[in-house]
Image: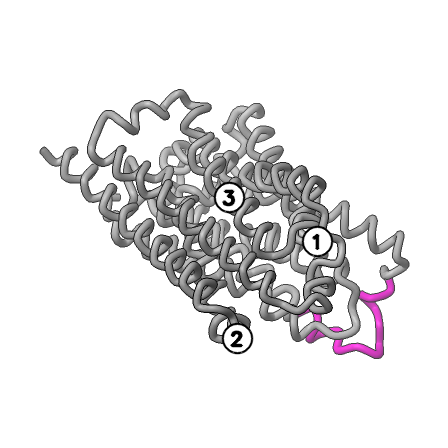
Amino acid sequence: MDPNPSLGVAIITMGGLAGAVFYIPFKKVKGWAWESYWMVYAIVGLVVAPWLLTYFTSPNVLGVIRQTPGRELIYCCLCGAAWGIGGLTWGLMIRYLGVGLGLAIGCGLCSAAGTLVPKVLKGELMQLFESSAGITSFVGVVVSLAGIVLVGLAGMSKESELSEEVKKRAVAEYNFKKGMIVAVFSGLMSSAMNFGLQGGGTLENLAQTVEPVTAPIWRGMPVLVVVLFGGFLTNFLYCLYLNVTNKTLGDYTKTNVPLVGNLVFAGLAGAIWCSQFVCQKTGEPALGMMKYLSWAVLMASAILFSTLLGILLGEWNGTSKRTRTRLAAGLVLLIVSAILAGYSGSLEVGSTAV
C-alpha cells in the first residue's frame, strides 16, 4: 500500500470520533448495574466485534497466530490486560482529581507514553531528529500534548467557577496526592494498549505472507484481536467479581427491564468503541514510516470530538472568557497537531521518493 498520510490521518481521526461518542448508547440501558452493561460491552467490543471483522478482512488470522512466536503473543496480550487495568482505574482518577485535572494529566501521560515509549523500546527515538519529517512529527506530538493540557486547564477553570455546593458534588472526594498517584498509574497503564498494537510486528508481517494473504490495509487486524483479548480478560474478571459481590448476576435475566434493548445498546457501545482501534490500525499503513503517530492522532481527535460534543450539549455554558479561551486554544492545537502529523508523513513520502 502506497503511503497517503492525509488519508491515514483522516481514517484515524474518524476513530477518535468513535472513541468520543461510544458511551452514548449506554444512556439507553435501563435497570442494570454498571458492571452488567460493561460486561456486555466488553464481550462485544473486545471479542465478538473485532473477531467478526477480522474473520472477513484477514482470512489467514488463525494461521498467522499459530505461526507467531508465543513470546510476541503473550506480550501483546499482556499489554491489552495492562490497558484494561488502566481503564478500570480511570474513574478513580476522575473521582480524586475531577474531570479537568484528571483529563489533563491522565490523557497527557497516556498520549505521550503511548506515542514515544514504543520508539524508545525499539531504540528508534533519536532517529526522529535525523530528518525534517521526524522533527515535524515530534513537534506534532508536543503540540498535541499542549492542546490536551489546555483542554484540561479549561476543565479546571470550569470547576473553579462552580459554586461550593456544586463543586463538592462534582469532586466530593478530591485528594490531590491520591489523585496524582492514580493518574500516573492509570495514564501509563492505559498507554500499554499502543505498546501492544505496535509490538505485533511478526503478526503483521505474517498476515501478508501466510496464504490466503491479508490486504495491506487490514494487516493490523491479527494484532488487534490479540491485544483486545488481553483487555477483555481484565474487564471480564472485574465485572464478574462485581456481579458476584453486588449480587447483580440476575441483571442478565431480569424480566422487568428491556432485556433485548439493554443487550443491543450495551453491545453497540462496545462495537463503536472497538472501531476506534480498527481505524487506527487501518490508517497506519497510509502513514508509512510515520505510523507511530497513529496513537497521538487518535488520542487528540478523541479529546477534540468529546469536547466539541460537550459544547453542543451546553456543558460549557456560563463559563468565563478565560475558560472559553483556554478551551478554544486547546482545540486549535489539537487540530494543528493532526495537520502536522499529515504533513510529516508527506515529508517522509517526499524524501523516500527522492
Please, what is the three-letter code of the amino acid marked with disc 1?
Arg
Helix, strand or loop at mark 2: loop
Mark 1 sits on what residue?
A: 95
Instruction: Give the image quarter of residue 16.
Output: bottom left
The numbered mark at residue 12 is none
The earlier-in-sequence mark between 3 and 2 is 3
At 30% from the left edge and 53% from the top edge, which residue is drawn?
336
- The Cα atoms of the two marked residues, 1 and 3, are separated by 30 Å
Q: In the visual, does 191 lie left or right of 304?
A: right
Q: Which residues are magenta?
A: 250-264
The earlier-in-sequence mark between 2 and 1 is 1
At 52% from the left edge and 65% from the top edge, which residue is drawn?
21
Mark 3 sits on what residue?
A: 224
- The Cα atoms of the two marked residues, 2 and 1, are separated by 23 Å
Is residue 223 a member of the stretch shown in magenta? no
> Label 1 neighbourhood size at 10 Å, few (<14), some (14-19), many (20+)?
some
Please say if the residues under marks 3 and 2 sit with CB atoms less than 8 Å apart: no
Q: Is residue 177 above or below residue 246?
A: above
The numbered mark at residue 318 is 2
